[in-house]
Amino acid sequence: MSSEKQYIDLYNGYRQMIREHSSEVMNAVRDKAFDDFQQLGFPSKKAERYKYIDIQKIFEPDFGLNLRRLEMPLNPYEEFKCGVPNLDTSLYFVVNDSFYSKIRHGSPLPEGVIVGSLRDETAKNPDFIGKYYSKIAKTEEDAITALNTMLAQDGLLVYVPKGVKVDRAVQVINILRSDIDLMLNRRVLIIVEEEAEIKLLFCDDSADDRNFLATQVIEVYVAKGASLDLYCLEETHHKNTRVSNVYVEQQANSRVNHNIITLHNGVTRNRLDLVFKGEGAECNCNGCVIADKQQFVDNNTLIDHQVGHCTSNELYKYVLDDRATGAFAGRVVVRHDAQKTVSEERNQNLCITKEAHMYTQPMLEIYADDVKCAHGSTVGQLNDAALFYMRQRGISLKEAKLLLEFAFVGEVIDQIKLEPLREHLHHLVEKRFRGELNKCEGCKLCQ
């Protein structure tokens, strides 16, 4: 329990301060989360869902925390210029793990839609938000979720009322900003009511060359007939470690597109738990990882078909260069009553060098007899015959490799529904393969 002790001591010593700078809804589950964390402890590699990552080592260092919620000296609207060309978005910022409340008002959101501070919004409407907060992110089942729940003081709330369609995409920039090595605990709650629609783009960026440790828990409720597109793009640096747990609950005839793109990072662990609660629902879960040097990316997914007539599609692709390491474990469970399930799970990977490593484990558990399910994975290197073919036509070896890598991940990028974002990501991916950092003119965060 050596790694856990500092967090147990931290909570015992600063419990009152943590509570004073949060809300009653978040505080109501805090002590239970602490008890669950003490009971669970950090998982070892013996735990099935953590077999490829050393969680205890990640949480050993002593990071600073901003428990007093001191305001960071940053005006993101002035310093951030990394917009997506031709994509008109409603722009918001989360600095470390606090919603940036000094919103620059542009075109207003539809009536009733909320994008704001989780702490402040729960204080305004505790009974309603209390019905959702920390309900599907169960602290008794996962130590990271428990740790985040006991320490998180603010975060982001996205709420879309019944029948409201948000035409303009909502972009949320998560900025890492600190003068010291910092731990942050970000919380996100997304509620999309019946027949409502929204597109969300979350971008992780770094403003400082410091060691960051980020825990993130995202709870997503998608009601009957509702639609959510959730795009997550990570472009931080090699000193950043992120452990993110996403929990999604879908009701009947709902649709979720979840796309996660890792372009620059240090150590990344992404967990996705998605459960179908109503018939006729559909999810498309796609992931793209480009890693080199000694970067590490672990994606772990669970899709739980609890009812029939639902469809799930998963596609995760990795390109690993140098000494990078990737891991993918995807589990699809089809329950006894989930007849007429359609599910496909694919994980395809390229190891550019002999030193790159990929661990892959696609899994299917089927307890129903009238289903159409498939899963598979591949790990390989660039096709020598294709390289030879292009070399024969005057294309340099470096350019030929780049073209093959770009075409390989293009299948994932093409799943993105927002055309301007799709085109922008094609541009970012090409620059990434060429070894170019994405620097935007006039953006201080890119310097």
Image: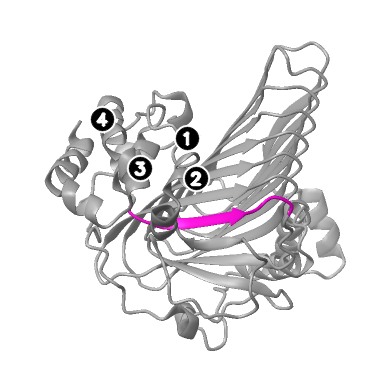
Task: Estimate the spatial distance between the alpha carbons at disc 3 and disc 1, rounded to whole Å.
Answer: 11 Å
Q: Which residue is drawn at 35% across and 33% down?
A: 143
Q: Residue 149 carries which label?
A: 3
Pointer 2: what residue? 128
Q: Residue 50 carries which label?
A: none
- Quarter location, residue 413: bottom right
Pointer 4: residues within 10 angstroms few (<14), some, or many (20+)? Answer: some
Residues at circles 3 and 4 in contact by the CB criterion of under 8 Å: no
Label 1 secondary element: loop
Residues at circles 3 and 1 in contact by the CB criterion of under 8 Å: no
Task: Estimate the spatial distance between the alpha carbons at disc 2 and disc 1, rounded to whole Å.
Answer: 13 Å
Of label 2 and label 1, which has the lower sequence position?
2
Q: What stretch is highlighted in magenta?
A: 153-163
Amino acid type of the residue tagged 3 in the rendering: Thr
Mark toward the viewer: 2 or 1: 2
Of label 4 and label 2, which has the lower sequence position?
4
Q: Residue at x 27, y 64 (%)?
A: 69
Label 2 secondary element: helix
Pointer 4: what residue? 35
